[in-house]
Image (spheres, grey):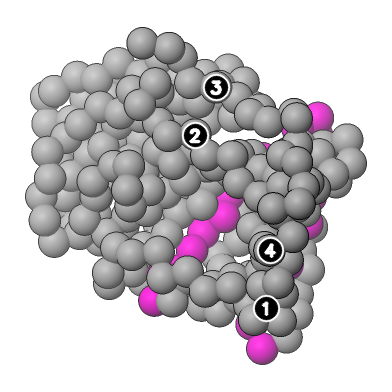
Amino acid sequence: MLEYAKLRIVTDADTFNTGGDEVIVLPLAGSCAVTIDGERFELEGRESVFSAVTDFVYAPIGSHVVIDGEGRFALPAAPASRRLPARYGPAEDVPVELRGAGNASRQVNNFASVEAFECDTLIAVEVLTPNGNWSSYPPHRHDDLEEIYYYEVSGGGFAYQRVYDGMELLAEVRSGDRINLPLGYHGPSMAAPGYDLYYLNVMAGPVREWNFVDDPDHAWIRDTWAEQELDPRLPMTKARTK
């Protein structure tokens, strides 16, 4: 049972109180209106996670939230102590990062990264991996951060996730699957040939910092990227222009 990182996936409509959690409403597919304590936000959303970068909305602790729309929506959340204002995050303001090189190339949509969007404890990003590539690589850990990966795979396909928690585990994942990652090293996330991979990465802990540490046995791989080109299939999705 995770103490900090939380995630729900809801369909079409939902009503809830945030209580002691800060929550982001992120369209995976479809659009919606989100009303937070009487303030209404319109989310244009997207057709799918493989079609576009999406807008989103932030709901603070102690608020009443109503989602009204058609589609599938992710609700990453984490306990918070500060009550920040409810805010709309435009898709065009989401920093899109192209990371790695060669067959370790991937795209990161930093919609609620530490640097891009203010939250109290919650960190959330989207990762898109072209088919045949590896992401979350080299294997690494985030000290003092709990993590959740929620997956979608194009074309009804499958992917694989490696986790290390005292022993190596390899899990097959499909659309709608999630893995609660233990503290410690994890990765890579492997997109099978023919099937692009998406995952929503939700992180939270006592301090909102990345605390990123490569597995020392495999950290050398990062140095090889300087000699390789970025995968030309990236970016896979783009934000709408202003």
Along the line of sight, the residue nearer the viewer: 52 or 46: 52
Q: Residue at label 1? A: 164
Vertical position of residue 42 compared to residue 214: above or below: above
Circle on res. 238: 3
- How far apart, in angstroms, are the residues tagged by discs 1 and 2? 28 Å
Q: Report if the CB atoms under discs 1 and 3 are less than 8 Å apart.
A: no
Q: How many C-alpha atoms fall within 10 Å of the one at disc 1: few (<14), some, or many (≥20)?
A: some
What span is colored magenta in the figure? 144-166
The residue under the point 16% across, 35% down is: 86
Secondary structure, mark 4, is helix
In this rendered view, identify the residue nearer to me: 12 or 185: 185
Q: Position of residue 89 (x, y in %)?
A: 30, 28
Mark 3 to mark 2 CA distance (whole Å): 8 Å
N-terminal-most mark, 1 or 3:
1
Residue 143 in percent (x, y) is at 43, 76
The image quarter containing residue 211 is bottom left
Q: Amino acid at mark 2?
A: Val
Q: Which residue is mark 4?
A: 223
Residues at marks 4 and 1 touching, judged by CB atoms closer than 8 Å: no
Mark with earlier residue (2, 4): 2
Name the kind of residue labelled 1 in the image.
Tyr
